[in-house]
Image (spheres, helix red, strand yellow):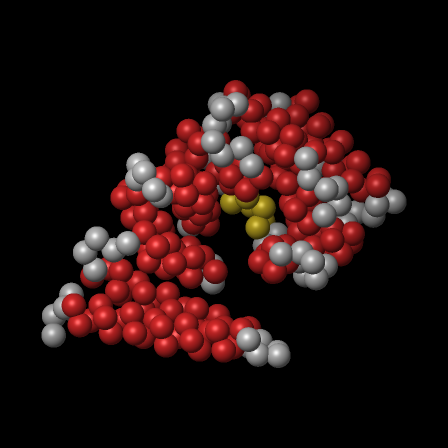
Amino acid sequence: DAPDAKETGRAALDLYQAFKDRSDRLKGADEPDVEGIAAATLDMAKALSVSNSITPGVPYNYLRIESRLWLEIDRWQEAREPLEKIVKRFLDDEDEGENVIKQVIPDLAEAMIETGAVAEAKDLLTRYVIGENAPLGTRTPTILMSRAMMGSIIGSGSGVKTTPGAGGTEEEFDFITKRLDTIENGLSAWTCEWYEAKLAAIYAYYVWGQDNAKKLETAKNLIDDISSFMDGDTTFKLVDEGCNLEEVDAQMRRRLGGGTLSSRYQWLYNKTR
């Protein structure tokens, strides 16, 4: 049969459902098989991708499910295709447009950043994040805009490093640092999400500070304040403790726990000396 035959699409959906059933069984076990769940998720994503790629006028929810599956296993490049299709087809849709702006735009921006397309991510986010009346003024889109502009601190332990950002105007730097400060002040202090937002703010001042000595001094003072609260601990162990708590969202704990966020604090602390 031709690769775009209707039978192929139906078979791919049946395969997706079989993998989903397997994933549900694994997740429902007393001791969930993390590797098995990840493998099933990959299989689900591949099967749904086949169906979505050959189905004319594929519905929003099918594309959204596919994108979330790729994102769940950090397959950023693969996630971009369904996310970009959603934005192109549904951004102005009466029923789905708001969901596209609030959920899909940030996901697509993150996928762009993770694949090195920081200029594209900045262009995508600017109209939704920059400006007092912009619709995406919450923590995640703001941090993503900061990453698109300033770059990112990635890795953990001795492997901490940075990736470049697209830069920005003085006005954009001023806006995003103030917005990060506002968001951080609205979070419960000393929680993992607070530590993440705080590090984003400090790093934004650090990057801006490469051309502005006052901003570099601000970065140094901010991270010194956190170390002082921790009785001068420059290993930032309390950051790690905060991100390893069971009540922390599982995805956040996976991303930032296990010494990851604390080692990035150590790196930035040393960079501001």
Residue 77 in the figure: left or right of residue 13: right
Write the residue at 74% across / 38% down: 223
Q: Is residue 271 visible?
A: no
Is 202 in front, or is 187?
Answer: 187
Horizontal and vertical percent position of residue 135: 47, 31
Q: Is residue 49 visible?
A: yes
Is 117 in front, or is 4?
Answer: 4
**Looking at this rendering, what residue extends furthest in the front direction?**
95
Position of the N terminus, as image quadrant, is bottom left
Horizontal and vertical percent position of residue 177: 60, 29
**Looking at this rendering, what residue extends furthest in the left direction?**
1
Is 60 in front, or is 136?
Answer: 60
Horizontal and vertical percent position of residue 13: 29, 70
Write the residue at 42% across / 29% down: 127
Residue 90 in the figure: left or right of residue 72: left
Residue 66 in the figure: left or right of residue 1: right
Horizontal and vertical percent position of residue 23: 46, 74
Q: Is residue 3 above or below residue 199?
A: below
Q: Is residue 176 above or below residue 121?
A: above
- Total of numbered circles in the picture? 0
**Looking at this rendering, what residue extends furthest in the top direction?**
171
Write the residue at 26% across / 65% down: 50
Can you tell which quarter of the image residue 29 is in?
bottom right
Write the residue at 78% across / 54% down: 237
Position of the C terminus, as image quadrant, is top right
Q: Is residue 157 above or below residue 97?
A: below
Q: Is residue 108 above or below residue 22?
A: above
